[in-house]
Amino acid sequence: MRLRQGQFSFLPDLTDDDIRTQAQYAIDNGWAVSVEYTDDPHPRNSYWEMWGHPMFDNPDAAAVVYEVNECRKEHGGKYIRVLAFDATAGWESIRMSFIVNRPAEEPGFRVVRQEGEGRSIRYTVESYAMREPEGARYA
Amino acid sequence: MTAEPKEMSPQTVDLAAAYEASGVKEVLRELDETLIGLAPVKKRIKETAALLLVDRARREMGLATETPTLHMSFTGNPGTGKTTVALKIADLLHRLGYVRKGHLVTVTRDDLVGQYIGHTAPKTKEVLKKAMGGVLFIDEAYYLYRPENERDYGQEAIEILLQVMENNRDDLVVVLAGYADRMDRFFDSNPGFRSRIAHHIEFPDYSDDELARISETMLAEQNYVFDGAGKRAMEEYIGKRRAQPHFANARSIRNALDRARLRQANRLFETSTGPLDAKALSTITEADIRPSRVFQGGLDVDRAHEETRA
Ligand SMILES: Nc1ncnc2c1ncn2[C@@H]1O[C@H](COP(=O)(O)OP(=O)(O)OP(=O)(O)O)[C@@H](O)[C@H]1O
Ligand SMILES: [Mg+2]
């Protein structure tokens, strides 16, 4: 099951050239672009690992593609995303986020039901991948 | 991502029109006008521009696909205009569409090589990323290679540079600069660089006459002029300065003119009695040039004096 998170996730995988075009848009807007990776695909996981520092002063987005590829060399079997952070007062927030790399096999999520008092049920989702320990979640 | 309909390749090409449209003409004209002398350098740059225009036309016709290797080496003595020309080249490559932004990032060994283990790779990569879309100018590139120390971190920077010069040819152009003899030795011991560099450009020393003309244009840029005797003094200065240590071609001239302007200001301050007109404020005379140490035998004489005083 393909993970659908962030921008463009219903489109086919972005090519390096697509990534460059999108990252250039962010740079031209003055946003800091960074690369992050994780092997925990839960939609509420906000603790992706940073790959290097955010890039503040690279005028050309080839630098972003370069870092994405460096990250792929080490974490090619995980999820990698590109973020653009807008530091202007009032925004101070992520303006773009899109997945640029995903594991070959994505096992998807299961629904977990927890029975509470008075027949109430709490629902949650859990990635099948999360049953394996960190580092062993994807081939 | 969306497959665009493939454009029909053109059947013919109008090189003259492409030359006009690209704006290369202006860069070359500016190069000709603002830089004095350097005939062989200008010739090489024109040839390279022609090559790139033709290459671009060939690619549009589907005759070529590879990005040509554009990495260069600039060899020449200090102050012969290497950095200045690199700026123009960046502009030229940008106009021809070979680099996307056209900025110049100038570095030396210290910007690339770290102080401890694990420091060099991130440092070199930061610089490379900053230069992407433009031109990376590595001044005195041979300092990267220190054969006498086999653990030198420079080697690590060299390896990353070589990799990026090969794999990211579309993303940046690297110019290695330095003195001719040391660059030759550097290339001999680093064949990887030699094979990745397509254009070797040599910067000759300026003749006395060229330096005199450079001094006049430098002054004109700042709205100053020599009077007759001032000009003759400058010509004499150039002949003497060349024979003295640390001579750095056009840079020595720039420094001499800075000091001449200082002396002129002091002279005006001390000697003027009434109102000064624009002409007086912008004329460099013999009196502003001749007090230079260069006419007393140069720096060495100065040092000798200090030693006898000490
Ligand atoms: N042909 C020229 N015409 C006019 N000015 C020049 C010319 N060549 C150099 N200059 C001026 O001389 C100064 C030194 O030039 P530049 O910095 O390009 O030399 P360089 O070869 O890079 O020197 P170094 O090897 O010491 O770094 C600059 O201020 C530049 O503007
Ligand atoms: Mg220089």
Image (cartoon, coloured by chain):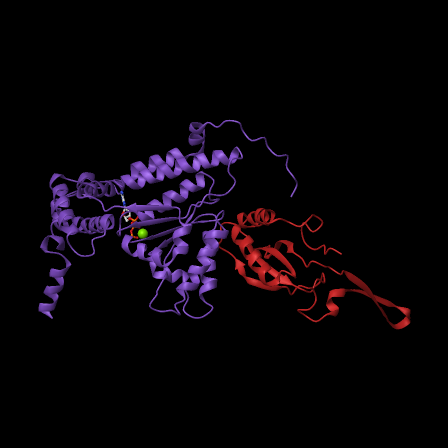
Does A128 sit above or below residue A65?
Answer: below
Q: Residue at x 75, y 61 (%)?
A: A107
Q: Residue at x 54, y 35 (%)?
A: B62
Image quadrant containing the C terminus of chain B: bottom left
Describe residue B188's horizontal placement relative to residue B292 as left or right. Answer: right
- Expressed as whole percent of the image width and height from the top left, the position of residue B186 reads 34, 57
Q: Is residue B195 visible?
A: yes
Which lettered chain is shown in red? A
Image quadrant containing the N terminus of chain B: top right
Describe residue B167's horizontal placement relative to residue A18 as left or right. Answer: left
Which of B281 and B251 lies nearest the eye of the viewer? B251
Q: Residue at x 51, y 56 (%)?
A: A56
Which lettered chain is shown in purple? B
- Expressed as whole percent of the image width and height from the top left, the position of residue A94 reads 61, 56
Which of B132 and B143 lies nearest the eye of the viewer? B143
Q: Is residue A88 visible?
A: no
Describe residue A96's horizontal placement relative to residue A129 as left or right. Answer: left
Describe residue B43's horizontal placement relative to residue B105 as left or right. Answer: left
- Expressed as whole percent of the image width and height from the top left, the position of residue B196 reads 42, 51
The residue furthest right is A119
- Expressed as whole percent of the image width and height from the top left, the position of residue B88 reads 37, 43
Total number of numbered discs in the rendering: 0
Task: Give the quadrant of residue B214.
Answer: top left
